[in-house]
Image (cartoon, helix red, strand yellow):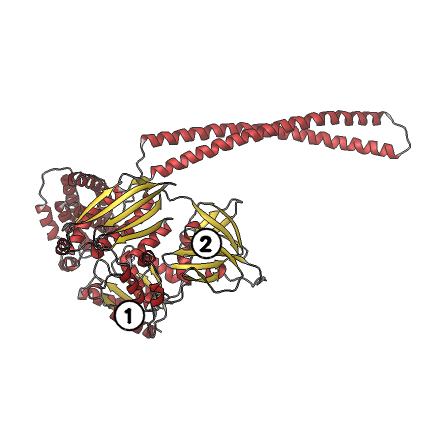
Amino acid sequence: MPGNDDDLRETLLATFRDEADEHLSAITGELIALERGEGIDPDLAESVYRRTHSLKGAARAVSLREIESVCQHLETALSAVRNGSFVPDAAGYDLFHRAIHLIRSILAGEKVSPVAIIRELRAVKGEKTAVLEKKAASTPTRSELPRLRETGTVRIANETLDRLITGSDELLTTRLSMGHRMRELDAMMIRFSLWQWTHVQVATDLRRIEELLRSDRDMIYEDWVALDRILKFQKKNREFIDSLRHDLTTHIQENARNLHILESSTQVIADTIHDAVLLPVSHILASFPGFIREVAGSSGKQVDFAVDGGEIEIDRRLLEALKDPLTHLIRNAIDHGIEHPGTRVAKGKNPKGRIHIRVVPLAGSRVGIDISDDGKGIDPGVIRRSAIEKGLLNEEEAGNLSDDESMKLVFRSGLSTSPDVTELSGRGLGLAIVEDAVTRLGGDVAITSIPGQNTCVRMYLPVRLSNFRGVVVSAGRRKYVIPMQQVRQVIRMKPGAEEIRIGDDLIRLIPLERGLGVKLPPMKIDPERPIPVVLLASGAGKLGIYVDELIRVQEIVVRSLGSQLRHVRRIAGAGILEDGSVALVIDPLDLIISTLPRGEGRGGRLDPATGRVLVVEDSVTSREFLRAILEDAGYFVECAYDGADALQRLKQEEFDIVVSDVDMPRVNGFALTEAIRSSTHLSALPVVLVTSLDSPGDQEYGIHLGADAYIIKSMFEKDAFLRVVRDVSRHGA
């Protein structure tokens, strides 16, 4: 992690230059393709617009205001092109290219002014464009961190390349040796064929001698010749067997040596390739200081940010997956933990709070990531009271919990120690999201706190995402793999029980095939014979599953089921077992969630709602927020991350209502609504749009497309939202 602001800015600028060069090259090529085409290609126009929008956001992140301003006005002009209100001629395309050239000049450090280009870009706008600009200006921007860029390339150090070359050379040597052995085996097969041909001849001679022995005749010349051939064959047969035994022994030894070299070389290559995708943790933390200053400033607080161990490297896929959990933890720390300056001074603290991320290597190729703050901490008593209010515990259960046990409750979805819901947090979602994300990555998470002083969340994670250990089980004549990370215990008990108490937990029990929705003919089960029960645990809860047999524990490489089967519920992928057979890999988190009774753990409610709701939202926080509200009301909720994903789910599953955002990648909420209304079997499906687009034109357009309700996020109110969903659902039914 850079040691000061200047180093940080240089790091960010270097990253931005690489990203900007990629965007500018793509924009230039797509503008040329647009100009050459007949009419405006909507896909190209959309791509140019989105790339310009991304470049504008990246420029804002590194405070390059001139580039941001040019991109803003270029984006507005391209929006008019995309919407068809402006069709550029040669002069128009020339203007766009000059704007791109100006941005490159600014990046190169040249002293150029963007005023003239901005004035010309403003001149291309028509009435519709002006309305769009006004709407964009009135729409609040969200404080979100950029994703890691997918450039399609990975930078590899010379040392890593040398290791790969060495490993490949070893493989080449082994291949040559195996080729030589194959030629020797061919020669052995030729010798065996000759022996087989001779054996056939001798078999005829043996029958002749057997007939002679059964008869009373004397031996003739042909009998002596046959007997001579038999004796010679027996001598050569002993020599052939000795030679074959020697050759086979040599081949076994050589193949064992080649296998050892092959295993060693492939392991070196695999480790080297995995090392090539390792990135320092500081890679995702570089943009956090500005993010923290922005979030803290919006809440009237002052926060310093420090990182130790940012140079430690972990898998880039892990880094990308950690972005949301870290964002949630920092938001929670600022909103729940760090006090306002006046309050901190009154407590004898520094008016500036402190958030500290510390990365430490652990044994077994794992790392620990601590996220701590010196705020007000967490009071276990407040957690217990909140759990009682939410219906997660009763008074007796809460009274029996120790402080350490109470702290674990903060990872339960729907529990929050904050009485207020703010833009940052207070919805009881962040820590549940964190635990689920970390668990999916094969890690664990823990929390400690001293009330009034500090809070620390520690994540234990593997350095790499690759193989994992799984429990291979059989159920209903099929084999499955259950990831070890979610297996808490394995017991044996008589079948039939629907729940079991382990310590203070009452855990539901179901057969695995029933949890997967697999319909099989009934099997004869001895009710007196104990069978294995695998106890699973995650942030969503606990579940026990009956299985027929525990087979083994082994390393598994998970393979995707492919794009056609990516929505198969409760299955994470497939793996190849030691015997070469293929087994499905269970997704324990999805299995637990899908088998939860509606509204479980949400507390008692009168007249609970029912029905299946599809929530379509690209923001993780908004998605989980809506999910929690709807599940709390008794609905069964599924989620899609954009309109395209939603349409795919609607083809495979039945839902009673769709709740969708509007501004999403690929297929937005308006296009989704239009697709639903134009579909023969989905046209009656109720659709509620929940969005930040608050202009009357957007509202009218949404209703015109067929939305049953249009809710603005800035005016969102939980009870009113649930009333709308309930009323729309009844109307649709």
In the rendered image, residue 206, in percent from the top left (x then y), is placed at 79, 32
Image check: 314 left or right of 716?
right
Mark drawn on residue 652: none
Look at the numbered discs 1 and 2 and tell me whether their residues touch, using CB distance below 8 Å. no
Image check: 570 left or right of 692?
right
Residue type at mark 1? Leu
SS category of the residue bearing label 1: helix
SS category of the residue bearing label 2: strand
For label 1, the residue is 722
Q: How many marks?
A: 2
Q: Height in image: 311 above or below 166?
A: below
Mark 1 or mark 2: whose residue is earlier in sequence: 2
Where the C terminus falls, by quadrant? bottom left
Q: Nearer the viewer, residue 164 or 425?
A: 425
Image check: 721 left or right of 524?
left
Q: Nearer the viewer, residue 103 or 126?
A: 103
Q: Residues within 10 Å of mark 2 (few under 14, many from 20)?
A: few
Q: Can you see residue 682?
A: no
Where the N terminus falls, by quadrant? top left
In the rendered image, residue 32, in percent from the top left (x then y), is placed at 22, 44
In the rendered image, residue 653, in percent from the top left (x then y), is placed at 40, 63
Residue type at mark 2? Gln
- Residue 652 lies in what quarter of the image? bottom left
Q: Residue at x 32, y 34 (%)?
A: 156
Q: Nearer the viewer, mark 1 or mark 2?
A: 2
Q: Residue at x 51, y 30 (%)?
A: 258
Mark drawn on residue 489: 2
Real-space CA distance between mark 1 and mark 2, rounded to the nearest whole angstrom: 39 Å
Q: Residue at x 43, y 53 (%)?
A: 488
Q: Residues within 10 Å of mark 1 (few under 14, many from 20)?
A: some
Q: Find the residue positioned furthest to the right.
A: 216
